[in-house]
Image (cartoon, rainbow, N blue to C red):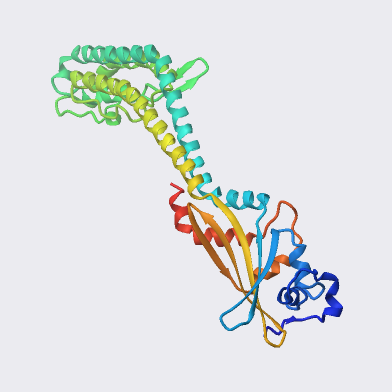
């Protein structure tokens, strides 16, 4: 016999015993579970509970002829909404989060495509001017045979295409004094002195640099659809190589921009699959017909023993149950509001369906 449950004499507890209750049911309902609350009988606690409705009592004999009393109740519609909301919360948060991120990617791609379209003419103008200045530099380089016969044009090309200037209100401010210093640009020839290299550069090359700064850099700064950082660190060993590289780079932008539309289709298809998964998971994880069941045994000496309890429910066409010991009884003694149920009900279902819920989160 469970020593925490005592039977109250009928004279004392008759005010809570229904006339239609059987002897076994009356004994259980008239008992007090001192381990939980000694201020009310089991019958009063269960018949006035707020977390589970439509409670019914029944009894039958076990294989040894002992009376077993069963109490069954239903989780309310509000309680069902709470359970289903908590069960789908994880997958829904994961899937809708992915959809939101994909939509952000789509928005960013659309903005990038639109920006490229708006700046297409500016981009093409910049490409032509860069190539034009490469040819200007080649002509200036060839104006001095002593230089062109002993020095490769490569460092001059790389220097021009990587000139860095700071934008000011009145335009671009560049320090051009160092642009022609040989030791700053890796220029060397045993046949040409440093002084001559610098003098020739100041005369022939520097004007092209200054034209590039004046005419090309302002255009590049207006182009937001392309990042030029590090793009032309190396532009080839000849003007033709450099021009080809410029063309390839700019054609690559156009090709990349076209491929972006394919990314949009990819993310849209992904979102379609995510939404389909979410809808399927809402069906798979829908919980219904949640009931609580409690079992007591009336002993031959008239005592009452609590045997066990269980939570039963239906999910995806399958009936499942969670076995409880004494801890299920205590919830009958707690006053819950209309929008409250014990978290234990939700957690037990979550734990029992962990793998299914996890698989629904992708």
When the figure is inspected, residue 317 is found, relative to residue 229, above or below; the finding is below
Q: Is residue 218 left or right of residue 37?
A: left
Left or right: 115 with respect to 253?
right
Query: Which residue is drawn at the image coordinates 19% and 22% (left, top)?
Result: 241
Percent position (x, y) of residue 287? Answer: 55, 52
Q: Nearer the viewer, residue 353 or 171?
A: 353
Is any atom of residue 180 visible in this view?
A: no
Q: Residue at x 38, y 27 (%)?
A: 227
Q: Percent x, y for residue 1?
A: 67, 85
- Residue that sits furthest to the bottom in the current view: 301
**Image quadrant in which you'd find residue 345:** bottom right
Which is nearer the eye, 71 or 18?
Answer: 18
- Count of residue discs: 0
**Which one is nearer the viewer's eye here, 350 or 324?**
324
Against 198, residue 26 (above or below) is: below
State left or right for residue 306 relative to residue 334.
left
- Answer whether residue 259 is visible to the viewer in this image: yes
- Image coordinates for residue 48, horizontal then vertical, percent: 77, 62
| 123 relative position to 50: left or right | left
Image spot of residue 284 (x, y percent): 48, 49
Q: Compared with residue 57, is residue 223 higher up or lower down, i.e. above or below?
A: above
């Amino acid at each position: 016999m469970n020593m925490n449950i005592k039977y109250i004499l009928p004279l004392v507890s008759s005010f809570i015993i229904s006339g239609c209750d059987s002897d076994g049911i009356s004994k259980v309902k008239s008992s007090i579970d001192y381990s939980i609350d000694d201020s009310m009988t089991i019958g009063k606690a269960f018949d006035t509970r707020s977390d589970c409705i439509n409670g019914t009592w029944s009894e039958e004999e076990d294989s040894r002829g002992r009376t077993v009393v069963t109490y069954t109740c239903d989780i309310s519609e509000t309680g069902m909404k709470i359970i289903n909301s908590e069960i789908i919360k994880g997958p829904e948060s994961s899937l809708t989060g992915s959809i939101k991120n994909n939509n952000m990617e789509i928005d960013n791609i659309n903005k990038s495509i639109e920006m490229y379209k708006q700046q297409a003419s500016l981009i093409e103008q910049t490409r032509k001017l860069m190539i034009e200045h490469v040819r200007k530099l080649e002509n200036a380089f060839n104006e001095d045979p002593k230089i062109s016969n002993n020095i490769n044009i490569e460092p001059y090309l790389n220097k021009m295409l990587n000139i860095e200037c700071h934008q000011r209100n009145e335009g671009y401010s560049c320090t051009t004094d160092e642009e022609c210093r040989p030791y700053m640009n890796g220029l060397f020839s045993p046949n040409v002195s440093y002084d001559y290299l610098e003098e020739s550069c100041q005369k022939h090359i520097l004007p092209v640099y200054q034209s590039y700064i004046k005419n090309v850099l302002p255009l590049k700064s207006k182009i937001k659809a392309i990042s030029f950082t590090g793009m032309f660190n190396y532009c080839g060993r000849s003007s033709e190589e450099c021009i080809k590289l410029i063309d390839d780079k700019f054609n690559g932008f156009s090709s990349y921009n076209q491929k972006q539309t394919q990314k949009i289709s990819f993310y849209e298809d992904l979102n379609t699959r995510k939404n389909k998964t979410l809808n399927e998971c809402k069906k798979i994880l829908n919980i219904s017909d949640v009931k609580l069941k409690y079992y007591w045994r009336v002993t031959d000496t008239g005592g009452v023993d609590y045997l066990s309890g269980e939570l039963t429910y239906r999910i995806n066409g399958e009936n499942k149950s969670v076995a409880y010991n004494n801890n299920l009884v205590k919830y009958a003694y707690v006053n819950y509001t209309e929008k409250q149920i014990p978290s234990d009900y939700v957690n037990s279902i979550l734990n029992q369906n962990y793998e299914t819920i996890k698989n629904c989160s992708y």
